[in-house]
Image (spheres, grey):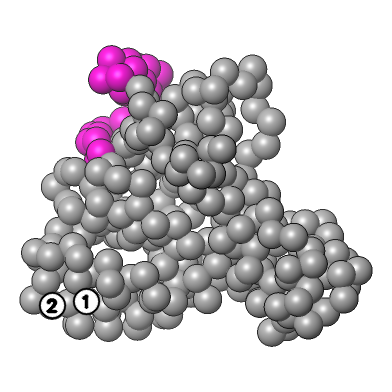
Amino acid sequence: KYENEGLILKYCTLFDYAKLGFHQIVMVAVNCIDRGILKNELQNMSGVISYGDIISNYDMFITFVFKDKIEFYNVFNEFLRKNAKNILKYTTFDTTYFEFFDLKIFDIPKPEKDFVIFTSQPNIALTEKDKKILSLISDNGRMKITEISKVVNLTCPAVLKKLKYYRESGIIQGVRLVFDMEKLGYYWAQLHLRLNCADQKTMNKIISFCRYHKFVNSIIFSVGLFNCAIQVIYHSDEEMRETVREIRDAFKQNILEYNLCFAENEGIVRTFPF
């Protein structure tokens, strides 16, 4: 029923990209003339995890994943060159830590499963069939074993064995539902923080705070002017304001500057864009 009504959009499989050999996750905010032109290019562009419209000093967000800084430099510079007349300005967040939390707005009493999608673990070699299976389940984490078996030309027991290996090795972190949050009356925004110190002790305090906060959905640490981004899911303006006040008051000794970036729509999510 929820699927037919468009409330549940998809079942995304979340991966630990480092174990797939991709160690560079970069979030980019761009100010452009025509968002439609960029979206047409991004929908099939390798390495693009997600993108969507935002309301702030910028028009769009884009999340890339690359093997290393050199690959990011080459791919992103080519992207800028092709869109030189469209992109007016941009800023990047070179991500060092990325974690999703439960949607606590649904009154889950305690965290059940957190998803760390960017660790320092060594990568695991994958065959072409492995990549095909991961691509299939990235857009549908509930895809039937029999359907996967037909597409990749493996027996069902062989597919099941591979899926078990992906989970046990940590390649697969879990499956997360993507909702049409606006149909539920909820919206999301990112609070960007410029911290005076992002050492491990400070990071642990902020992560712990966010993990149990009702309206916080994810946290990102990065290298850059704004070195922390906290995603907030909220129902009313007061919930948004109260969340910002609580974060500001809890870490006022660490926060030098902050700003808010509001999402205009759900955007597109592709967790295996290779």
Tag 2 and tag 1, C-beta contact below 8 Å = yes
**110, above or below 206, in the image:** above
Give the image location of residue 135, x and y in percent: 61, 70
Q: Nearer the viewer, residue 162 or 228?
A: 162
Q: Amino acid at mark 2?
A: Ala
Residue drawn at (87%, 70%) of the image = 156
Q: Callout 2: few (<14), some (14-19), or many (20+) C-alpha neighbours within 10 Å?
A: few
Tag 2's secondary structure?
Answer: loop
Total count of labels: 2
Residue that mark 1 sits on: 80
Q: Amino acid at mark 1?
A: Leu
Residue 241 part of the magenta-drawn span? yes
Stretch of the chain drawn in magenta: 236-262
Give the image location of residue 58, x and y in percent: 17, 52
Q: Callout 1: few (<14), some (14-19), or many (20+) C-alpha neighbours within 10 Å?
A: some
Q: Nearer the viewer, residue 259 or 143?
A: 143
**Distance between mark 2 and mark 1 Cα atoms:** 6 Å
Q: Which mark is residue 64?
A: none
Q: Residue furthest right?
A: 157
Tag 1's secondary structure?
Answer: helix
Q: Which mark is residue 84?
A: 2
**79, above or below 251, in the image:** below
Give the image location of residue 160, x and y in percent: 85, 64
